[in-house]
Amino acid sequence: MKKYVMTLVKYLKPLYFTYFLFGTLLVNILKFLILPEDNLILFVSFGGKKFDDSPRMIYEKMIQDPRFDRYELVWAFHDPSNFDIPRGKAIKTDSFQYYLTALKARSWITNSTVERGLNFKGRRTFYFNTWHGTPIKKMGADLSQNDKPVKHKAQWGVDVMTAQSTYESAVFSQAFQLDKEKFFVCGLPRNDDLVNVTTETQRAMKKKIGVPLDKKVILYAPTYREYERDRNFNCVLDPSIHFENWKKELGDEYVVLLRAHYEVAKVLNIETDDQFVFDVSAYPVLNDLMIASDLLISDYSSIYFDYSILDKPMICYAYDYEEYAEKRGLYFEIRESLPGGSISEGELLHLVKNLPYQESLELVREFREKYVESYGNATTASVDKIFENIALVEETSIQPVE
């Protein structure tokens, strides 16, 4: 019920503005009734849905770093009982405690937003945002008004946002209306694990996930279509694929890991086969799936940028390109960067079976060189950047941890 109500608030203009105006007013009144806490850090991943991604990488680095021994580390979740976190404290999003903690916090660390659709920031809060992917599809201010949820035009209070490239910082600067000086091109902390992956690492991940060791693994990771919704406002995914055809053509050599976007994972209109197609949409660590796989198939997802670090082939399966480009909008022509494009399912299967491996890798390397300039040391760089901005006075003499 809560998710349904929040979706209505997000997409119905009168309801959103009522929520925004009254909620923003109340939280900002509260801000001036409390004292900031200089040793308090708040973490939020995907708005409270998960304990993962770059915020988790930063968190796990911090709890091993003596510079942060005196800091109170708090995570916010929709359902804190679902998570067991080391050292830190878990609170519930959208509760009074959540807003109180957010206003007190010396730093917010997130890969999305903390404000819950409102406009506020603590009086001494350093807002560090890692975001959750490099964009192919239009975002933020670049979306047409008809294609996006209702948004208020208030300035976003981010102090530093990580980026993987100058391309990413340029796009997000426009989309999120942020000064380019706020971008820190260090890579994404979540991607540090994708560097120097070995055959042994991949084999271990296959065992962990439970896929056959004698088969190659295709990771199929389509993004969602926000314009395709059911009557309960849930995004749905109904791609032009028939996995029985995939199994017939590829089953002797491959298995498939199906990773649907979290927006559609619970209302997936695809039949899976546990002997060939493994639905790993709810699997908690995306990096594991990327490491275990031998080939990526996607459409307009930011996963391309992360996956390119692994130096493995990628295929673009943009079966609805014209519709998607018109309704959502794209920053560049992805079909020109990778094998595939606006091809049929049959053509896709033929391409997988006859993929020119070396030629495909060259395209991946060109893609990475253009769009992923920095990777491999983002967690350390991020933790150092945060410490530089929030260090307690008596701690400033402590040297950064190498």
Image (cartoon, rainbow, N blue to C red):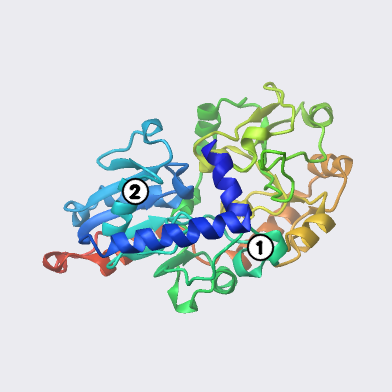
Query: Relative to residue 44, is residue 327 depicted above or below?
Result: below
Q: How many marks?
A: 2
Q: What residue type is labelled 2?
A: Tyr
Element on which disc 1 rests: helix
Which residue matches tag 2?
98
Which residue matches tag 1?
367
Residue depicted at 69% across the width and 45% down the height: 222
The 10 Å Cα crowd at callout 1, few under 14, some 14 to 19, many 20 or more, is some
Residue 288 on image: x %, y %: 52, 39
In the picture, measured across the screen, residue 44 lies left or right of residue 374, that is left
Point out the residue furthest to the top here: 275
State the image quarter where residue 335 is shown: bottom right
Does residue 290 appear anywhere in the picture? no
Residue depicted at 85% across the width and 41% down the height: 345
* Mark 1 or mark 2, whichever is nearer to me: 2
Does residue 273 appear anywhere in the picture? yes
Residue 251 on image: x %, y %: 77, 27
Discs 1, 2 touching: Cβ within 8 Å: no
Residue 217 on image: x %, y %: 66, 35
Query: Relative to residue 212, is residue 311 depicted above or below?
Result: below
In the picture, measured across the screen, residue 56 lies left or right of residue 372, that is left
Of residues 59 and 381, the one nearer the viewer is 59
State the image quarter where residue 232 is shown: top right
Residue depicted at 20% across the width and 53% down the height: 71
